[in-house]
Amino acid sequence: MSQSNMVPVVNNGDGDNNENNNNVNNNNGGADNTNAGNDSGVQELGSGNTSSGNHGEGLENNQAPPPKKKRYNRHSQLQIQELESFFRECPHPDDNQRNALGVQLGLDPVQIKFWFQNKRTQSKNQQERHDNSELRTANNQLKFENQRLKEAIRQASCPKCGGKTAIGEMCFEEHHLRILNARMTEEIKQLSATAETIEKLRGKPVMSHPGMSPPTFEFGMGSNGRDVYGNVGNHSRETTGAADNKPIIMELAVGAMEELLVMAQVAEPLWMGGVDGTSLALNLAEYTRTFRKGLGPRLNGFRTEASRETGIVAMCPIGIVEMLMDENLWSTMFLGIVGRAKNHEQICADAAGNFNGNLQIMSAEYQVVSPLVSTRDSYFVRYSKQQGEGLWTVVDVSIDHLLPNLHPKCRRRPSGCLIQEIHSGYSKVTWVEHVEVDDSAGSYSIFKHLICTGQAFAANRWVAALARQCERISSMLATNFQSVDSGEHITLTNHGKMSMLKIAERVGRSFFNGLTSSMGSTFSGAGGEDIRVMTMKSVDDLGKPPGIILCAATSFWVPVPPNTVFDYLRDETNRAQWDVLCEGEMMQKIAEVINGRDNRNCASLLRKVNTCQTKMMIIQETSTDPTASFVLYAPVDMKSMEIALHGGGDPDFVALLPVGFAILPDGTGQPGGNEGGSLLTVSFQRLVELGPSGQLSTTSVATTENFIRRTVLRIKALFPCQTA
């Protein structure tokens, strides 16, 4: 074919293709084509190749005069309609389809090929122009809206004073605090109105409290000028002083909530890396600068502990709030931290019963699981509030200064948690723990480093304990329990597995109750410096044998990490080496129910290998999280266990007296480095008889102490280094 019959090709990117397509549109609204044969055509967009004819033509153009004007041939209207109809159904025809179209329309397959190439390029360019037009329109709308909002901000005025707000000169935190302040001020008015209504209905005079502006709370001195923080009193005292100061308590709670919201969300410079390398520690200088009108100056002689931790827990926000607002559920949820709790008075309650705006006065004992460390007593107000859809906050703040003759050594600045729903029943919990303590008279011995560095009650302990208990509850609510079965194990139904978990849970509760010093009375002259011996009287205590229960406990240090100690003690094959109850005989596991993602979190049923010589079994509960581990067990009657597991008996009636170990890190470990040692607390409970004089016999006490000492010595001997 002659060169003059070819369709001219300009393959120079999108712009050239557009030029070619525009040429086509001007002619007949379709793709360009000629009546040429196989040598004619246009190359597809982006191919990167050029036809030899065009290449030669380009060279000619550089050396010779322009050629004659090329003759363009147009497809007929019928051909264009048929091609476009086929293009709508198949924009990429294969060779067979192109040949068939060529025969049908009287065109060469190469002409068909290049028509489709041009048509695809044309369609693509048209779509891009349309998209660009829409984006330009949307961009112009956004610019207009942005300008309108900027103008509104410049002209904004304060609703209180009518002055300029000058938001543009504020940092984000200050602007956020101003919004919170306005909202909390309105909330104070609502709570005060509610309190007035309640007091009028009760016939009591309402305390006048002028002014609803954000108050400055001075905790340092009481109304009579004395230091209000001295020796702690008991928690059963009257709360008349607090009842007469409800408006002040409401303001205090609202201010504490405002502070907690900032503390839980603002990062550096307010928070820095903690001692343990995981939790965040408070920058006290930045805190004082940020909260100048907070809860007053820090008390002389008091040491500050402040930390923040975030974690994911398997429970919805309202479920967590419900447990925090119920003192019994709260103390059960944090068994290793909260020794005892009491709800003295509920000041405000949500009418719908969903805890939004609940305000209550509480007291609590916070404990390290050891008889060598005294408890921390706190008297505080707890306030729960829904901040938005799926977002809750619960805050504590001390109110000791409102009560006469109350001198606690632990003052809680705004502490609590921000709970945010994420998905599928899970919540993101940000916990802030901020306290001031007077431990100058305390003697912590081996626990000194753990306590003085703030790790004993740090925020990560609360989050880890909450996550572990939520995981435990979730597993107990499941229809199918995870368990381990083998030829030596007994087969349990789901009812039997649930009963086994309930009995194991009772072992844990009884163990911690025995360690709480206020639950029993110390036996005069018993124990010595390292072993604490207490007596508890059991009369109508369900699941405990009636009589006098002797509880002995002590703590000691071993130079190995907590995980190593935990794994060794929980392994039933090692019990003969340290458990005095085994009397040197091997133990075997006959049942196990897992209650967490970590298989080490489980309830187990153990018995001696030679079962013909005993009618006793051991129910064991093992639990671990990153901050604490527990191996707790109790001898139980074999017949009672069989009835509870298989006969449908009530597991609460299985009598038990627990023995066990609480394992804490000694606080010297570092992430990725030295793991530090372990602090172990062992506790043992046994039923004893009173002597003729109605007092405990020295033999009973000596036997119990001997049991504890033998257990401690055996465990110390199992590890490579002797403890000091």
Image (spheres, rainbow, N blue to C red):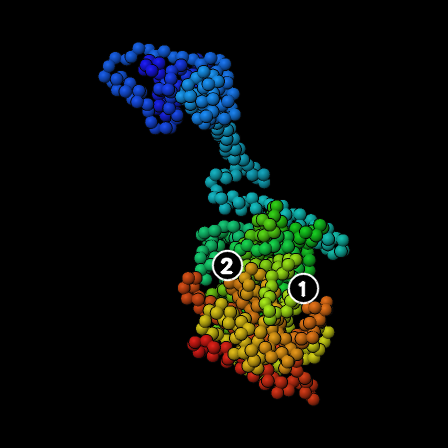
Q: Give the tally of numbered discs.
A: 2
Query: Residue pushed farthest left?
Result: 63
Q: CA distance from mark 1 to mark 2?
A: 44 Å
Element type at marker 1?
loop
Say which quarter of the image contains residue 520.
bottom right
Relative horizontal placement of residue 197, taking residue 154 as reference (left or right): right
Q: Foreground residue, 590 or 475? A: 590
Quadrant of the frame with the C terminus:
bottom left
Q: What residue is disc 2 on?
A: 307
Contact (CB < 8 A) between labels 1 and 2?
no
Position of residue 169 relative to residue 713, above or below, is above
Q: Percent position (x, y) of residue 165?
A: 52, 39
Residue that appears at 58% across and 44% down: 182
Element type at marker 2?
strand
Q: Percent position (x, y) of residue 370?
A: 55, 72
Q: Percent position (x, y) of residue 173?
A: 50, 46
Q: Residues within 10 Å of mark 2 (few under 14, many from 20)?
A: many
Residue that appears at 62% across and 56% down: 320
Q: Foreground residue, 22 or 348? A: 22
Relative horizontal placement of residue 722, taking residue 533 as reference (left or right): left
Q: Foreground residue, 318 or 266? A: 318
Amino acid under label 1? Thr
The answer to whether residue 224 shows anywhere in this view is: no
Residue that appears at 67% across and 75% down: 638
Q: Residues within 10 Å of mark 1 (few under 14, many from 20)?
A: few
Say which quarter of the image contains residue 238.
bottom right
Amino acid under label 2? Ser
Quadrant of the frame with the N terminus:
top left
The answer to whether residue 500 shows anywhere in this view is: yes
Residue that appears at 47% across and 74% down: 558
Q: What residue is disc 1 on?
A: 493
